[in-house]
Image (cartoon, rainbow, N blue to C red):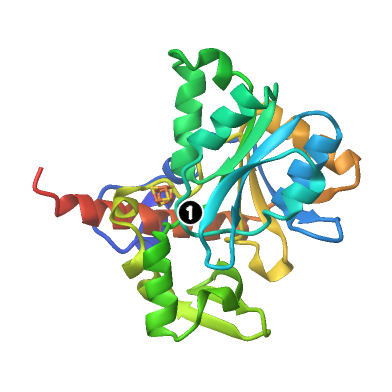
């Protein structure tokens, strides 16, 4: 039995076709475990801060959220602005206007964009199949895609945590997927772990047909899966540009990286197959 078949039988829940590592992980150069060496913010924040400080980029489109977890894409041109947007937001955020503002109104020449796998794919298409946006898209220098199992509408997110768990949105400090749970860290230090099945029940319908967990179209994909225990992040390096900017960040002392272990890769694959199977099950039910 080929290794991939065993892997899918172990990791997947559906009965569809074999899903290979390449399907889930996409094309890549290397998979790294990365730790921020900065006093504040995680590995992605450190990477973007280093790229900005080194002049590799002159701005980044990042997502900030207010106390009610209403997200907004903003243009960050300083390390402080990048830091103020640290952390996953979990609520779908339109980004095109902010990207156009960065490129047209602010006239930035080389920007980074941090987004979901579907946003990374749209940006890659803009770069590779340029229509009228060709010149603008060429100024997107770095696409960082975040591992994604789904996103909420702001209302859906509020309903899940307020109605079911009695938590008011302003109480939430951080929200992350950790192993089997969607984990909320509250400002008073409490930790609320919501089982992933409930989390999946609240995400947007469109996400149920999406099979891209690892942001296959990005220059660097980043996520926690497979790296939770060590307080690190997984970076999947997909382009020479991504590799060069990671090296720059390391040379500047913003980050430390080492090769990911087989166990790390297995964890990512397992989660990616679960998402793939979810998409299969959902699309099988569609009437067309
Ligand atoms: S699950 Fe797919 S469609 Fe939904 S936000 Fe994530 S990448 Fe986009």
Q: Position of 128 compared to 82: left or right? A: left
Residue 235, percent from left and from top: 66, 47
- Numbered disc 1: secondary structure: loop
Q: Is residue 152 above or below residue 187?
A: above
Q: Position of 241 compared to 205: left or right? A: right
Determine the residue positioned at 61% across, 77% down.
185
Residue 186, image quadrant:
bottom right
Residue 56, percent from left and from top: 78, 28
Q: Is residue 39 above or below residue 183?
A: above
Q: Position of 25 compared to 28: left or right? A: left
Residue 195, image quadrant:
bottom left
Residue 203, image quadrant:
bottom left
Q: Is residue 112 above or below residue 281?
A: above
Question: Which residue is nearer to you in this view: 202 or 61?
Answer: 61
Residue 75, percent from left and from top: 66, 39
Residue closest to the far front: 105
Which residue is tagged 1? 148
Determine the residue positioned at 46% across, 34% down.
121
Question: Which residue is nearer to you in this view: 266 or 40?
Answer: 40
Residue closest to the far right: 252
Quadrant location, the C terminus? top left
Question: Which residue is nearer to you in this view: 66 or 259?
Answer: 66
Question: Which residue is nearer to you in this view: 247 or 128?
Answer: 128
Residue 200, percent from left and from top: 36, 66
The reply to whether the residue tagged 1 has its Cβ within 8 angstroms of ligand 1 is yes
Report if residue 158 is visible in the image. yes
Report if residue 21 is visible in the image. no
State the count of labels: 1
Q: Decide: few, some or many residues near mark 1? Use Cα within 10 Å; few <14, some 14-19, many ≥20.
A: many
């Amino acid at each position: 039995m080929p290794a991939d078949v065993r892997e899918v039988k172990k990791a997947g829940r559906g009965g569809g076709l074999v899903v290979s590592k390449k399907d889930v992980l996409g094309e890549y150069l290397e998979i790294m475990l990365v730790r921020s060496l900065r006093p504040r913010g995680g590995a992605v924040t450190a990477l973007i801060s280093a790229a900005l400080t080194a002049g590799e980029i002159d701005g980044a489109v990042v997502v900030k959220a207010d106390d009610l977890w209403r997200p907004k894409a903003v243009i960050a041109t300083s390390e402080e602005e990048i830091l103020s947007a640290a952390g996953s937001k979990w609520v779908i955020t339109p980004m095109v206007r902010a990207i156009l503002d960065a490129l047209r109104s602010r006239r930035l020449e080389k920007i980074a964009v941090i987004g979901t796998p579907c946003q990374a794919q749209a940006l890659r298409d803009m770069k590779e199949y340029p229509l009228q946006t060709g010149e603008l898209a060429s100024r997107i220098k770095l696409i960082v895609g975040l591992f994604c199992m789904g996103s909420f509408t702001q209302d859906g997110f509020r309903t899940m945590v307020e109605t079911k768990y009695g938590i008011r949105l302003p109480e939430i400090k951080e929200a992350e997927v950790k192993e089997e749970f969607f984990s909320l860290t509250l400002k008073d230090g409490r930790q609320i772990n919501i089982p992933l099945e409930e989390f999946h029940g609240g995400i947007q319908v469109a996400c149920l047909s999406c099979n891209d967990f690892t942001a296959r179209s990005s220059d660097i994909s980043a996520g926690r899966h497979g790296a939770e225990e060590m307080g690190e992040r997984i970076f999947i390096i997909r382009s020479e540009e991504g590799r060069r900017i990671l090296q720059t960040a390391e040379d500047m002392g913003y980050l430390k990286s080492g090769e990911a272990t087989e166990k790390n890769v297995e964890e990512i694959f397992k989660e990616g197959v679960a998402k793939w199977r979810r998409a299969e099950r959902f699309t099988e039910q569609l009437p067309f």
